[in-house]
Amino acid sequence: MTAHSTYEPKTGIERWLDTRLPIVRLGVEMLDFPTPKNLNYWWTFGGILTFCLLTQIVTGVVLAMHYQAGGASAFLSVEQGIMRDVNYGWLIRGIHANGASMFFIAVYIHMFRGMYYGSYKAPRELLWLLGCVIYLLMMATAFMGYVLPWGQMSFWGAKVITNLLGAFPIIGKPITTLLWGGFAVDDPTLNRFFSLHYLLPFLIAAVVALHIWALHVPGNNNPTGVEVQTKADTVPFHPYYTVKDGFAIALFLILFSVFIFYEPDALGHADNFIAANPLVTPAHIVPEWYFLPFYAILRAIPDKLSGVIAMFGAIAMLFILPWLNTSKVKSMRYRPTMRVYFLIFLAVCLVLGWCGAQLPDDPVIPGVHTFTLVDSDLNSYVWLSRISTLYYFAYFLLITPMLGLRETPLPVPDSISKPVLSGEAAKKD
């Protein structure tokens, strides 16, 4: 259901601008856009993510003015220059560093919500694909940003992760050398990562614009999964959802502020407050928390190339999800069996994140001996990661397509208004 613009230019300047660059008309159309009346607070994370992106871009530009991309100066420019010498540098860096984690918290909730309510199904496949592209760009941007402070974990994380690309035959080594700018992680690597880290957020913003455009063609999905049929199913985006999004952003800012002002380093790693030293390897090299599930999948497979393929394959599953789901019902609200499997999938993702954060040679229970397989000591974390990895891929490749064909869903309402309005209110409508 599409809406016609109600905007009428009232002044000469407005009419002149409207015939040449109808930006005011575009803004009015976005505010008046008919939106399903039954959207719950899970739908506010789109606005929260827009806020996070703008915050990261603004603080990132300010930090770039004071950052020095060099092996001898990067660490001091952050820990001394920005944190101590720049006015409110500690605040700007705290917002930017914790903002990355807040960004990923919001995007994971946004993605799981889309999976639960079937927001990736026709006619919104392209909308979902653009969201996956944004997620991939976010991961690349966050990884490169993690390297820039040039602490111990930054340096060794860059070395380990970029070395993974070398596992690919023929193209692996040339790509790794190109990223490094030589034959080791050094100053040229830092310069490359700084340039790309500065560029990619603007590319993300461009894809976000496409994402919003793709959203406004078919319109929002909703908790019932039923498409909008009449005007009675919708309300204007403003003021109903601008107020709702604003309230959700205010609550989100409270959580954000707790980390910035009370626990600014809680989501970081202690080793990253030590200057990078190529001669001293940290006891446990781990990425940021939002990469840990994929890191656990990588470590669960003993063969390096197979592990890298599985790690990238885990992300690729998201891209093909619209074509794996064979069910005619979008929302899991009416698919009780699939809902159980989805909740298990959600738990598996959390378990993978937990396993990725553990030392690979520590037992889950102190004093309990680890398993032995092919002359290699494999602890319980490895086995748990393998079982979780198996379920992760089974959810996409087996459960989602097969259950869609075999499951008998609950009755789906004929329209959005039926579950929203009842009794006398429905008659008046």
Image (spheres, grey):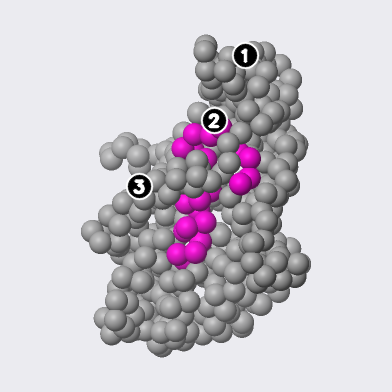
Query: Callout 2, which amino acid?
Result: Asn
- Nearer to us of marks 3 and 1 is 3
Question: Which label's residue is closer to the chain start, 3 or 1?
Answer: 3
In the rendered structure, does residue 49 fall within the stretch colored magenta? yes
| Quadrant in the picture for the C terminus | top right
User: At numbered mark 3, what does the secondary structure look like: helix, strand or loop?
Assistant: helix
Tell me the crowding category of disc 3: few under 14, some 14 to 19, or many 20 or more residues within 10 angstroms, Cα based: few
Residue wearing tag 3: 251
Residue 124: % across, % down = 71, 41
Residue 103: % across, % down = 47, 55
Tell me the crowding category of disc 2: few under 14, some 14 to 19, or many 20 or more residues within 10 angstroms, Cα based: some
Q: Residue at x 32, y 77 (%)?
A: 89
Query: Vertical placement of 155 versus 300: above or below?
Result: below
Residue wearing tag 1: 410
Question: Which label's residue is closer to the chain start, 2 or 3?
Answer: 2
The CA distance from mark 2 to mark 3 is 21 Å
Query: Callout 3, which amino acid?
Result: Leu
- Nearer to us of marks 2 and 3 is 2
> In the figure, is residue 143 to the left or right of 362?
right
> Which region is colored magenta?
32-56
- Nearer to us of marks 1 and 2 is 2
Chief SS of the magenta region? helix
Residue 38 disc label: 2
Q: Nearer the viewer, residue 334 or 343?
A: 334
The quadrant holding residue 304 is bottom right
Residue 345: % across, % down = 53, 33
The CA distance from mark 3 to mark 1 is 34 Å
